[in-house]
Amino acid sequence: MPSTPLKNAMTPGARLPGIWLSLCSPTVTEIAAGSGADWLLVDMEHAPADLSQIADHLRAARGASGDSGAEVIVRPPSSDQVMTKRLLDIGVRNLMFPMIQDAEAARQAVSWTRYAPEGVRGISATIRANDYARQGDYLSRYAEELCLILQVETPEALANIAEIAAVPGVDAIFVGPGDLAAAMGYPGQTMAEPVQQAIAEALAAIHAGGKAAGILGYGEAAARRYFEMGFDFTAIAGDAWMLARELDGLVARLAR
């Protein structure tokens, strides 16, 4: 495993650019891992990624960037105990749980990642996460290497940030600007002034709770805006977004 878990870097004051991956291609993951980005998000919520593919994404990222490169975060299809267990067993150690609304949901999510007595994760003795039973100290060390990121995506969730951040085991909080804008009555308008004001207030609340704050902001202008606001980790581009944008632009320029 990489020697420096992502959770050690996820601190207020960091500046960690990441890339959002939704094309379900380990080859794209391999390319992205060599870019110099600090983290890659493999999306299962809004992309048709299958559980059986995730280990290949982990291998691709590790092969491209080695011990000191980009770490993979996986966003499961939903915040779910069984899927969490299966992702952890195949070696995922950075998880982003979508649509967390309050502290109780946060506590549940954390419990899914911990073995008893701290949580409810079931034990399997021979799994990829413990190098197929070769890592004898896995049960005593696994929690040190887990990074749990919770998404807040509605005004209700934003109002509960202080309580969510106080839950033991929560490492960072990620603002979902698209769903937040829609929930506020501004679908597709993440830069609307009320939405940006809510995002700024969320950022302040996350930092007040001592947690790293993340957000999605594709493109140089948006990413710079959010880093300058004080966000600690920002998704600066997505694979599908970048491919469509660059292809459209190139074709348009050469078709004139």
Image (cartoon, rainbow, N blue to C red):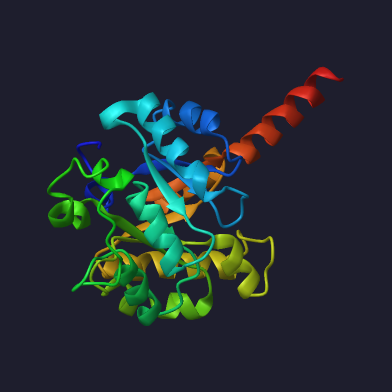
Q: Is residue 199 left or right of residue 207?
A: right
Q: Name the quarter where the C terminus is drawn.
A: top right
Q: Residue at x 24, y 46 (%)?
A: 130
Residue 207 image position (x, y, % from top left): 30, 64
Residue 174 visible in the displayed image: no
Residue 84: x and y, percent? Answer: 40, 61
In this rendering, the answer to whether 120 lies above or below 211 is: below
Please state the horizontal and vertical placement of residue 149, each as a whole percent of the image.
Answer: 37, 60
Give the residue displayed 44% in from the left and 50% down from the top. 74
Residue drawn at x 51%, y 50% is 51
Q: Residue 97 in the image: state x and y as whole percent.
A: 44, 63
Tell whether 172 sits left or right of 118: right
On the image, which quarter does residue 201 sit in? bottom left
Residue in the picture at 46% in, 46% down: 41
Q: Is residue 222 above or below residue 116?
A: above
Residue that lies at the very extreme toward the right in this rendered image? 256
Q: In this rendering, is residue 137 above or below 134?
A: below
Is 58 placed left or right of 26 in the picture? left
- Front residue of 240/140: it is 140
**Depth order, front residue of 70/182:** 70
User: What is the number of callouts on the image?
Assistant: 0
Task: Please determine whether, in this image, residue 151 is positioned above or below residue 71.
Answer: below
Residue 65, image quadrant: top left
Quadrant where the image shows the N terminus: top left
Taking depth in this image into account, of 208 and 142 the one nearest to the observer is 142
Question: Taking the image as drawn, is residue 182 in sight?
Answer: yes
